Structures are given as C-alpha cells and as structure tokens.
Image: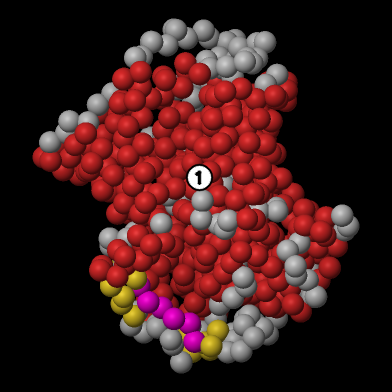
Amino acid sequence: MWPQTYDPLGNAVLSTLLAALPVVVLLGTLGVLRWSAHMAALVGLATSLVVAIVVFGMPAPMALATAAFGGAYGLFPIGWIVLNVIFLYQLTEARGLFTTLRESITHITRDRRLQLLLVAFCFGAFFEGAAGFGTPVAVTAAILIGLGFSPLAASGLSLIANTAPVAFGALGTPIIALQSVTELDLMDLSAMVGRQLPVFSIIIPFWLIWAFAGFRGMVQIWPAVLVAGVAFAVPQFLVSNYHGPWLVDVVAAVVSMGAVALFLKVWQPSELWLKTGNESNAPVVPDAPRAYSGREVRQAWMPWIILSVIVFAWGLPQVKALLDGISILRFPVPELHNLVMRTPPVVAEARPEAAVFALNWLSATGSGIFVASLIAGLVMGFSLWDLMKHYWRTLLLVRYSLLTISAMMAIGYTTRYSGLDATMGLAFAQTGYFYPIFGTMLGWLGVALTGSDTSSNVLFGSLQRITAEQLDLSPTLMAAANSSGGVMGKMIDAQSIVVASTATKWFGHEGDILRYVFFHSLVLAFLVGVLVFLQAYVPPFTWMVVQ
C-alpha cells in the first residue's frame, strides 16, 4: 500500500509548481514550440512519470502500471469512438453523400454565419448529447470544411461551439460520474448544472458568431442567434431540472435546430455573408447550390440518422445494462488496484483507489457507432470487402490521433494516482472567499488536462465537495461548478484539438488551433466562475442554488 503525499517537498508552493509541470510541458510544447500533438503528449507523459516517481515518491512499477491503465482507457473507449465516427464520415464522403448533406444546409440559408450556427452549435450539440467524447467536433468540423471554411476556422469554431452541451454529453455521463464520486443526489447535481449552463447556452452562439464574423457581423443576425440560444437554453433548464441528465442535450438540440430552421423561413439577414475565412476581405459569391430532391437529401442524412438512433438506443440505461450483463470484462490492474491510498484532506478518510479496466466491448458508445457505421455502409451500397478496406484506411488516417489520445489519458491517470492532481487542487482551495471562482477554474484545468468533463469530475468532484464543506459553501454548487467550468476547457484539451485537426485533415497544425481557442476558453471559464461566485454569495443569484 502506497499512501499519497500532497506536499513531498515540505513547501506547498514548490510542490504545486512541480505537480503542474506536466501540464506546463504539454501545453508549452503544443502551443509555444508547435510540436505535433502526439510528440507533445508523449513528452508530457514522460514528465508526469518523472515527477510522480522522483518527486512524489510513487513506486516506479506502480507509476508505469498507472500510465498503461490510462493509455488503455484512451484507446478504449475514447479512441474507439473517434475511430468509428471518422470511419462513418469517410464512407459518406466516398459515396458523395457528405457533399449532398452539407449543400442541403445551404438551402436553409446561404449566409455563412447562419450555416455556422446551425452546424457547429445546433447540430454539434445533438451529437454531443448522443455520443460525446469528440464526436460532435469530428462531425461539425468536417461539415464546415466541406462548406468552404478554412481549416483553422472549421476547427476552432467547432471547438468553441462544443462547450455549453458538454456537461450533459453522452446521455449525461459527466453528471452521472460526478454523482458517483461525490455521493450527492443525482437530480440535485443535474438541476444545479442546469441552472448554470443555460446562461452560457445563450451567450455561446453570440460568442461563436462574433469570433467568426466580428461584432458587426454578429449584430446583423442577432435575432437568429437569440432564437438558437434561447431555444436551446430553455429545454436545457427544464429537462435537467425536471427529468434528469440523460436527454438534456438531445432534446435541447432538436428544439434549437427546429426553431432556427422555422425562424429562417420568415426572416433573413439584410446583408448576405458569403465569406468563410478562405477568401480575401472582399466577399466571393459562390455558385448557386445545386437543387437536390427530397429523396437525395434523405439519403444524405440517412447515415447520420442511423447513427443517432442507434447511439441513442445504445446509451439507454436499460440497454446498456443488458449489453454489460452479457459482455463486460473487468481486469484489476496489477501493481495498482487498491494499492494507492488517497489520504486527507482530499478525502474525509483514507481509502484505497480502485484500478479496474472495464472492457465493455459491446455496450461502449464506440461499439454502437461501429454497428451504425456498418449498417449505414450497407445501406449506402458498400460490400463487406469495401467496408474492410475503408476501415483500414481510416485506421491509418487516425493512428497518430489515437496515439495522442492514449498518451493524454495516461498523463491524466498518472496525475490522479500519484496525487499531482490533488496537490494542484489543494492550492486552489487556499483561495478562501474566492474559491467559487478558483474551484470553477479547477474544473476547467481538469478537462484541459484529461480531455473529458467526465474525467475531470472523477478527479476533482470529491475534492470540490470536501473543500466546499470546509468553506461553508454548498457542495452541490461547487460539484456542479466543476462540471460547468470544465466544459470551457473542452476546447483546449489535446484530445479535442487532435479530433478537430483530423476531421479537417489539417495535420501538424494543432498548435495553431490551440492558440486560436485558448483566449476564448480562459475568458469563458472565468465568466462561469463569476456566475458561480454570484450564486454562492449574492442575492438574488443565491436562489438558483439547489437546496
């Protein structure tokens, strides 16, 4: 049994700085030195192992087992999702259906700002709610590229848009995980997050269009942007507060898409915006989009409808439990399972950390996507041999992305089991009265580091509850803040950036994407922190806190 220590140097400042070193190395090599994502992640992993073993005293075999555990989780289930959704995209592109799909959107509007709103915010939110784990960024970035957006704009804007839905992504997985580590009421957590993120569900569409078209360009279409945001925020609040976390994004996205499409039948901007970021400052008038028949449009959307239906059904608790019952395999990790002792003040009482790799090969979201891809491929007329060839090509295409994701998760697991994450978290807890802001930023840091709101909630959820109770704050408020603040870190984590660069085929430019979105991520996370601060201390915002 190895007990974690959170101040190995006897100096909290130095211990915290060294605990943060893997994060600094990762983001520095990626954003400043412009290394490729997989090299930056591997160096960040090496740094985390050195700090864990040399500074924090973690036994080397245990540290290596931790990295292997995280790497395996990066490949399955996360990498498994990315691989299969890109596979489906490659199939639709090979059949020319993706061209039909993206051009069918231009029949709703040819204005690039409104296309961005429909694709990145509305459509992306639907995929976040249905699948999560990088799926929406992969899909929307690819669509925007097809619509003529530059690789940087397609990648960065997809990342900015994929924020407000993240806490309820993959049928509420982050909230469910948060409940499991905090032991707070699931409905209370769902309701609390549902009283924070709807504010930003209104802000994000305006922010998105402003980032793309500037303030004047945003003001010109503010009615449509407001419709998209409000039509998403209201169902998000209602479903999260009165039903639970499972269907929040799916319902909100469908309502938002429908509301915008109907609104554009009676309203269009006075000035048509045709620039996509690839042109010069002067607008370039594209050719009129081809008129597709209703049958052709349905065929183009059919693979994604198949994907949505199957993934939705795959994620239902009853279906998931049934599939788990006949397929799940659990492997306790040697040299690690129940051998790391989490100690106060991170937990109320010292307890061992479990380390069990669950190979839910049938119930995993990626397996649902794989089945949907096979069915959609057969519907599109591919033979089994053709599907095998396209799958192999997709695997070659995303091999470096899978390596990056695996290394990133290895870093996240190493920081968790070695106690580096807790050391950083305890530093945030010293902020006292301002903890609602810094606790929110801790969630942002967790997602930026691990690439997952779910993982951030697992890492810091318990710490948020303990710290909140020590500071006489609502533990439900601060646990929810970890998830709500974390969503803004989603746009800068290496996993999401790699997914975006892969979907846009803009390999080797991950650093450019990071620099594009970093300011947006930081400012939006701080604004979430300000809202949480107001909810903690300032009437009338305090009434929003779930009692």
Seen from the viewer's position, the closer of residues 197 and 429 is 197
Eyeballing the image, is 18 above or below 534? below
Report the side of 66 relative to 92 (left or right): right
**Residue at 12%, 41% in the rendered image:** 384
Asked where in the image residue 69 lies, by quadrant, the reply is: bottom left
- x, y percent for residue 488: 62, 50
Residue 416 seen in render: yes
Eyeballing the image, is 101 above or below 410? above
Colouring mode (rainbow / by chain / secondary structure / one colour): secondary structure
- x, y percent for residue 318: 38, 62
Q: Secondary structure at mark 1?
A: helix
**Residue at 35%, 60% in the rendered image:** 319
Q: Amino acid at mark 1?
A: Val
**Residue found farthest to the right:** 539
- Magenta part of the chain: 352-357
- x, y percent for residue 26: 52, 57
Residue assigned mark 1: 250
**Residue at 63%, 36% in the rendered image:** 231
**Residue at 70%, 39% in the rendered image:** 203
Eyeballing the image, is 407 above or below 81? below
Report the side of 27 relative to 310 (left or right): right
Seen from the viewer's position, the closer of residues 75 and 510 is 75
